[in-house]
Image (cartoon, coloured by chain):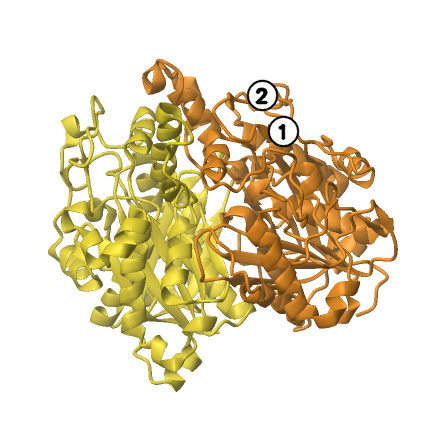
């Protein structure tokens, strides 16, 4: 039931992170991914998921081509690639939070299922027999239901919990976290499983190629010679929980989610407002809502797509919000290692930002060798940095202008 | 907190505008037409409740018409109507308003057309204009750009309850994050491939058995955009806005799709909506049923309504999906019609919107 009886206390709940899950091109789990990120390892390689010979860019941060066929699943139904990746991350997060032993405590799921069945539909359309050749058992695989992944995760958690499927393009994972945060903070929910997954498809590969926003080399966020993004695939999942609930069941707490800001650019379907005004609005909203001052931010996980305009707009946004202090905040783009995982990027990067606060580790921006005078902030180009991270932001700016910034704080930080 | 609707807009199989929708539903005749905008081939279903016969693309400027996909055109058209009616632009708060739209398949058709181009002529020849509208959140984004809203920008997808789920989220945002207004609703269009996949799944009515009859077996596919402007009751009253309806209380039950007990879930959803509205069944003047021709769902709902209302005199049980078909946005059309009915009969109206995948939404409207 979505609307639980709200806690009688008017005081807002503190929202904490008690479970993490992640599947990326540099690791098929949270631990392996984090180790790779800290080591500055890149998962970008030549795509072999489908034929890319006609594309200008032929690289992506791709998962193993047979990921879904090796995915251990007992359902006996056709699972799409995007679902297999999402289920793997969600399962890891649930187990990490100890939910597999007490499944009934999950109040709700908010998930984003990325490209749905586009990859499977493309495979069908590119086969000589097309739709006619489709066996009845395969219909579910190509059925375009973005919300099926949320249903499948719910089934894994025992079935009857509230669920929402969010679709706001590249900010989907971050928006999902925001919605779950609201419900826990307000007392409607106690525990939520939140995340997003996405996979490569000819649609996105071709689309971004057509828009000339992909680099034929591995992407170089904030570099003077950057030519565009490198796409990626993967999933991220987090268990959010009220602190009371986590304490009661002695769950390990990774970090506090201190708030978020979510705004609409109302500017352009694909292009950013290069003055940074629109994205600054989202960053400021996140700070305002969390009650954390700009001076207290120790790390920013940037959207950092490596397109010439995006990186400039994002830099301008940080300067608008933080003023001169923007020069003193370490900012990095993990997309330089795991690519732009599209709908999943907000969730994956939220997991990495939580780990940054937990481990006091700031991931680097790899491939940044020639500084851009228009992007003159501290992008951590030299390698992983080890320093105290009390409060960190994770930024996600989606196609269509849905901009969301999350705020995570270490457990022993003070606001 | 009281959440009210101060503006509404629609592009429905009945025509363009809420007046056409209400007039059409009042006439109690189905708006099912032979599918004409694509060839249904050897599908058993040959009819749908389409909006294309009303040429909604003619309602927007030619520049927008070139840039927007069809579902975004419907959403922008309905949103403009809703905002104009609410008069909210004059208050200066529209810029801080948020958006929450629901859709099952917006962007799907454009995505398929784009992929087909990539496969047929190669990526270099495929149109970048098509690609920008392949995301499901294209309608919400275009509405936001068109209206200049800078609040939250949400799109949710949840099968046949996508639109009503978006309205619930918008109402929740009003309560939790306090935006001055939310533009919310649902939009859906039908692409031939989506239609054929659903037909292969046996989801639609067999036209050879039931043709265009009301209360036939199986769903009739539909299209349409339905948009509401939500405000808090206090701010709407303060600015002297016309309040079209109030959302009194929600009942939402979500169960595992593999184990759906329709009667039980429907009963719980309706009971909770009444409970949250602080109403008893005898306060309700009409029920807008979820009924859509899917026998298992319809029978379960009927059982739940009988169990909940018993001998209480619910005079009207109305199934608008038997008139304008069924799609992910139809639940919002129900809310609009419920607002009109509640005013006409001076009693609250209960709206049901259920999905076979385990989503049960009920809301009391007065």
Helix, strand, or loop for circle 2?
loop
Residue A365 location (% of width, % of height):
74, 46
Mark 1 / mark 2, whichever is N-terminal: 2
Residue designated by label 1: A62
User: In terms of image quadrants, where is residue A111?
Assistant: top right
Disc tally is 2
Q: CA distance from mark 1 to mark 2?
A: 8 Å
Vertical position of residue B76 compared to residue A218: above or below: below
Q: Chain of mark 2?
A: A
The residue nearer to you, when weighing B149 against A226, is A226
Residue designated by label 2: A48
Question: What hue does chain B carry in this figure?
Answer: yellow
Q: Is residue A258 left or right of residue A411?
A: left
The residue nearer to you, when weighing B12 against A382, is A382
Could one spot residue A99 in this view of the protein?
Answer: no
At 35% from the left and 18% from the top, the residue drawn is: A130
Q: Is residue A247 left or right of residue A12?
A: right
Q: Is residue A25 left or right of residue B286?
A: right
Q: Dot 1: within a 10 Å radius of its alpha carbon, few (fewer than 14), some, or many (20 or more) residues?
A: many
At 35% from the left and 76% from the top, the residue drawn is: B89
Could one spot residue B39 in this view of the protein?
Answer: yes
Helix, strand, or loop for circle 1?
loop
Question: What hue does chain A carry in this figure?
Answer: orange
Residue B277 location (% of width, % of height):
43, 67
Residue A366 location (% of width, % of height):
74, 42
Q: Quadrant of the C terminus of chain A?
A: bottom right
Residue B97 has which mark?
none
Vertical position of residue A82 compared to residue B215: above or below: above
At 48% from the left and 40% from the top, the residue drawn is: A147
The residue nearer to you, when weighing B334 against B222, is B222
Vertical position of residue A381 compared to residue A6: above or below: above
């Amino acid at each position: 039931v979505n609307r639980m009886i709200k806690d009688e206390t008017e005081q807002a709940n503190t929202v904490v992170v008690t479970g993490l899950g992640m599947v990326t091109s540099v690791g098929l789990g949270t631990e392996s991914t984090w180790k790779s990120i800290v080591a500055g390892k890149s998962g970008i390689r030549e795509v072999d998921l489908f034929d890319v010979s006609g594309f200008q860019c032929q690289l992506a941060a791709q998962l193993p081509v047979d990921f879904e066929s090796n995915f251990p699943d007992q359902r006996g139904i056709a699972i799409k690639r995007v679902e297999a990746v999402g289920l793997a991350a969600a399962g890891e997060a649930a187990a990490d939070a100890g939910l597999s032993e007490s499944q009934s405590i999950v109040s709700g799921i908010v998930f984003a299922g990325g490209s749905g069945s586009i990859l499977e539909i493309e495979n069908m359309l590119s086969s000589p027999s097309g739709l006619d050749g489709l066996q009845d058992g395969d219909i579910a695989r190509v059925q375009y239901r973005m919300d099926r992944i949320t249903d499948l995760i719910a089934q894994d958690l025992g079935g009857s919990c509230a669920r929402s499927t969010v679709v706001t393009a590249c900010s989907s994972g971050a928006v999902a976290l925001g919605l779950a945060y609201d419900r826990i903070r307000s007392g409607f929910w106690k525990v939520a499983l939140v995340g997003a997954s996405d996979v490569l498809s000819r649609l996105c590969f071709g689309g971004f190629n057509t828009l000339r926003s992909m680099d034929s080399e591995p992407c170089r966020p904030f570099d003077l010679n950057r030519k565009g993004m490198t796409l990626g695939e993967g999933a991220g999942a987090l268990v959010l929980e009220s602190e009371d609930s986590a304490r009661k069941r002695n769950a390990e707490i990774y970090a506090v989610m201190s708030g978020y800001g979510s705004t609409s650019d109302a500017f352009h379907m694909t292009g950013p407002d290069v003055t940074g005004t629109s994205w600054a609005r989202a960053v400021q909203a996140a700070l305002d809502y969390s009650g954390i001052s700009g001076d207290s931010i120790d790390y920013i996980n940037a959207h950092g797509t490596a397109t010439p305009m995006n990186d400039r707009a994002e830099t301008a946004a940080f300067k608008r919000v933080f003023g001169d202090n923007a020069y003193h905040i370490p900012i990095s783009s993990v997309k330089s290692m795991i690519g732009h995982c599209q709908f999943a990027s907000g969730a994956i990067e939220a997991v990495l930002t939580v780990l940054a606060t937990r481990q006091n580790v700031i991931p680097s921006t790899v491939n940044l060798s020639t500084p851009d005078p228009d992007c003159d902030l501290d992008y951590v180009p030299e390698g992983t940095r080890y320093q105290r991270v009390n409060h960190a932001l994770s930024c996600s700016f989606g196609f269509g202008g849905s901009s969301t910034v999350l705020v995570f704080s270490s457990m022993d930080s003070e606001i | 907190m009281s959440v009210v609707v101060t503006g509404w807009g629609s592009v429905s199989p009945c025509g363009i505008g809420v007046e056409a929708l209400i007039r059409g539903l009042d006439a109690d005749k189905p708006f099912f037409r032979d599918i004409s905008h694509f060839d249904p081939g050897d599908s058993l279903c040959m009819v749908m409740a389409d909006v294309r016969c009303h040429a909604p693309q003619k309602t927007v400027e030619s520049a927008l018409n070139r840039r927007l996909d069809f579902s975004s055109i419907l959403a922008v058209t309905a949103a403009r109507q809703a905002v104009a009616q609410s008069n909210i632009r004059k208050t200066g708060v529209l810029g801080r308003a948020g958006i929450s739209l629901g859709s099952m398949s917006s962007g799907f058709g454009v995505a398929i057309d784009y992929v087909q181009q990539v496969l047929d002529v190669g990526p270099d020849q495929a149109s970048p204009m098509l690609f920008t509208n392949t995301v499901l959140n294209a309608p919400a984004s275009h509405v936001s750009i068109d209206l200049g809203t800078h609040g939250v920008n949400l799109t949710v997808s949840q099968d046949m309850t996508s639109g009503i789920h978006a309205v619930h989220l918008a109402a929740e945002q009003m309560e939790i994050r306090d935006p001055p207004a939310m533009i919310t609703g649902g939009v859906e269009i039908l692409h031939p491939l989506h239609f054929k996949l659903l037909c292969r799944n046996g989801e639609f009515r067999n036209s050879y058995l039931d043709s265009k009859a009301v209360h036939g077996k199986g769903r009739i596919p539909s299209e349409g955009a339905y948009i509401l402007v939500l405000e808090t009751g206090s701010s709407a009253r303060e600015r002297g806005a016309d309040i079209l309806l109030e959302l009194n209380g929600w009942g939402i039950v979500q169960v595992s799709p593999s184990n759906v007990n329709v009667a039980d879930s429907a009963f719980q959803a309706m009971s909770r909506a009444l409970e949250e509205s602080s109403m008893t069944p005898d306060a309700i003047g009409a029920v807008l049923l979820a009924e859509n021709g899917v026998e298992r769902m319809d029978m379960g709902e009927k059982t739940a309504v009988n169990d909940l209302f018993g001998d209480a005199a619910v005079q009207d049980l109305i199934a608008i999906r038997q008139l304008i078909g069924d799609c992910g946005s139809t639940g919002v059309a129900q809310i609009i019609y419920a607002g009109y009915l509640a005013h006409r009969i001076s009693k609250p109206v209960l709206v049901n919107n259920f999905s076979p995948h385990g989503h049960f939404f009920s809301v009391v409207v007065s």
